[in-house]
Amino acid sequence: MTNLDDLTALRELDPAGMLGHVEALPQQCRDAWALTRELELPADYLQVDKVLIAGMGGSAIGGDLAAAVVANRSPLPISVHRDYDLPAFADRKTLVIASSYSGNTEETVSAFRVAHERGCPLLAVATGGKLAQLAVDWQVPLISFGYRSMPRAALGYLLVSLLGVLRPLGVTGDLEPDLEEALQVMERQWAELAPTVPQAQNQAKRLAVELAGRVPVVVGAGPLATVTRRWKAQFNENGKSWACVEPLPEMNHNAVSGTHFPAEMAGRVFVLFLEGTGLHPRLELRLELTRKVFEGMGITCRQVPIHGQSTLAQILSAIQLGDAISCYLAALYRTDPTAIEDIVQLKERMSKQ
């Protein structure tokens, strides 16, 4: 098994520098906020009564997280759409934001075209590609940035730029203090998660070692329920590992009964309970009792404290921690966290049909 304190080995196993992108998350957020600080939307956009964010993969999760950040502030419903077409409710009073890092995501471009046909107010977030070209051709707002990475490694841009787009709609409130807190929390946290920090003092390395050879099951409640999907995706793409997510309170109505068979799975899963602050007291109780139920079944569980007070700070610090764990897990499996050959091959086959 890879020695996670061997910096040479880590660099060799991470040739494209995925861990460097995890370190850059705070700066991505700063740059994305600055990019949208002076954004002014057309007057008719301010009359919309709902928002739909179209995207896939790392681009879509930015929409999920943005919706979670403003869930308790926004008078407008915000939904995320992962498909080709659009739901029937998308109309001329629906702001459709197409988010695609490459600008060429097949499903997102298709949804953007359908939205244009329906006369929906449109906005695009992309580094280029077909999506950016359509925004130019149709003369609709385009948020473009030049950060070069895999889409999932640019989440700071994809999340915070969406918050910047939502701000002129009056649904975010004043996010400046929350963002500043998030940046400070992430920078302090990275000082404890960086590759140079020995495993004995490095939470991300220690959790990666415990996860190696097991299936991660990530549990979260409130805003952190959305973060669990990001952790799963990063375990999948970076670590090339199976992973599952279980949001509370829903899992108490099904998943707790699905732990008996196959009996040998109790020793093969590893349940991570993401625990932040500001939860409904009943959710806090459910986290505690669910963990005790699992432990009583012989299932290994870990409580993972998430730093920050504001929702945005907790979400971003949890993302940074999960991303770091997934990179160290990739090193333990001796796999490149950046490469995603299976996804690339599937896209190539789709393009030929």
Image: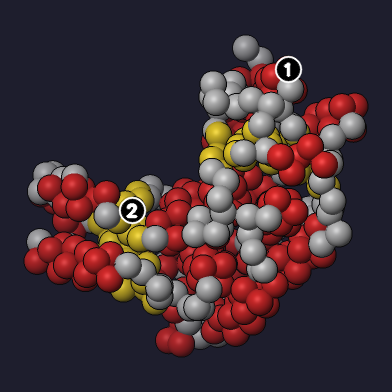
Which residue: 75% across, 54% down?
168
Which residue: 36% across, 69% down?
279
Q: Mark 1 or 2 closer to N-term?
A: 1
What SS does tag 1 mark? helix
Q: Nearer the viewer, residue 303 or 45?
A: 45
Image quadrant where one finds the N terminus: bottom left
Image quadrant where one finds the C terminus: top right
User: Picture coordinates of residue 203 (x, y %)?
Assistant: 44, 79
Q: Nearer the viewer, residue 41 or 336?
A: 41
User: Picture coordinates of residue 155 (x, y %)?
Assistant: 65, 56
The label shown at residue 40 is none
User: Picture coordinates of residue 121 (x, y %)?
Assistant: 74, 32
Residue 55, placed above or below residue 158: above
The residue indicated by pointer 1 is: 117
Work out whether residue 39 can be spotted.
Answer: yes
Q: Label 1 sits on what residue type? A: Glu
Residue 184, placed above or below residue 317: below
Count residues near mark 2 (Cα–Cα under 10 Å), then give few for <14, some for 14-19, many for 20+: many
Left or right: 142 in relation to 164 = right
Which residue: 66% across, 72% down?
179
Count residues near mark 1 (Cα–Cα under 10 Å), then give few for <14, some for 14-19, many for 20+: few
What SS does tag 2 mark? strand
Residue 108, placed above or below residue 152: above
User: Picture coordinates of residue 324 (x, y %)?
Assistant: 54, 67
Which residue: 16% across, 52% down?
256
Q: Label 2 sits on what residue type? A: Pro
Q: Nearer the viewer, residue 308 or 237?
A: 308
Left or right: 47 in relation to 220 = right
The residue indicated by pointer 2 is: 247
